[in-house]
Every structure is written in C-alpha cells, then in structure tokens.
Amino acid sequence: MTNPDLTTPESRVASARADLEATLDEIEDKLNVPKRVDELTTKARASYESNPVPWIVGAIGAAVAVASVVAWALLSDD
C-alpha cells in the first residue's frame, strides 16, 4: 500500500522540505548556547538548593587547589 499523499513528486518534495526544516530547527535549538547556559544554570541552582553540601565541598576543594598552585609557584626555587 502506498501513501496517497506521497504519490506525486511535488508532495514528496514538500515532505522532504518539511523534514529538513524540522531537522534544522532541532539542530538550531541544540546549538543555541544562551539557551543551554540558562538550562544548565537552572539545573545547577536546583541542585544547590536541594543539597548544598557537595557544592560547598567542591568550592572549598577548588579554593585549596588554586591556593596550592599559587603557593607552589611563589615558593618554588625554579
């Protein structure tokens, strides 16, 4: 059985164009950096609000790592 809507070349072209348009819209949405940043920010904020302890521990760990690198750079004999 064939689809009666796709029997003419014009209808197949129209269908292909619609598929291409939908695909390009999806690609544009995935590559929309400001939208992705907003989504990530929202997820991070929700994660922090639900359980801030891992975020605080991570921030302290990052601060210790930065301080260690700075101290090593200043106090090394190189």
Image (spheres, helix red, strand yellow):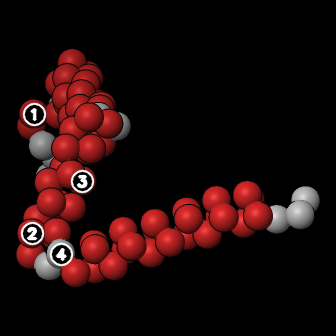
From the viewer's perspective, is the residue at label 3 or at label 1 nearer?
A: 3
Which residue has dot 3 on it? 40
- Position of 50 with respect to 64 (left or right) is left
Using the image, tell me which numbered label, if any, was put on residue 49: 2
Instruction: State the SS at label 2.
Output: helix
| Distance Cα–Cα, label 3 vs label 4 | 16 Å
| Distance Cα–Cα, label 3 vs label 1 | 42 Å
- Quarter holding the C terminus? bottom right
Label 3 is placed on what type of residue?
Leu
Task: Assess disc 1: are there few (<14), some (14-19) or many (≥20) residues with their C-alpha within 10 Å of its C-alpha.
Answer: few
Task: Assess disc 4: are there few (<14), some (14-19) or many (≥20) residues with their C-alpha within 10 Å of its C-alpha.
Answer: few
Label 4 is placed on what type of residue?
Pro
| Distance Cα–Cα, label 4 vs label 1 | 56 Å
The answer to whether the residues at label 4 and label 2 have Cβ atoms under 8 Å apart is yes
Label 2 is placed on what type of residue?
Glu
Task: Assess disc 3: are there few (<14), some (14-19) or many (≥20) residues with their C-alpha within 10 Å of its C-alpha.
Answer: few
Instruction: State the SS at label 3.
Output: helix
Instruction: State the SS at label 4.
Output: loop
Which residue has dot 1 on it? 5
- Position of 61 with respect to 65 (left or right) is left
Q: Kindly indicate the quadrant of the structure image that contains residue 14.
A: top left
Using the image, tell me which numbered label, if any, was put on residue 52: 4
| Distance Cα–Cα, label 2 vs label 1 | 52 Å
Label 1 is placed on what type of residue?
Asp
The answer to whether the residues at label 2 and label 3 have Cβ atoms under 8 Å apart is no
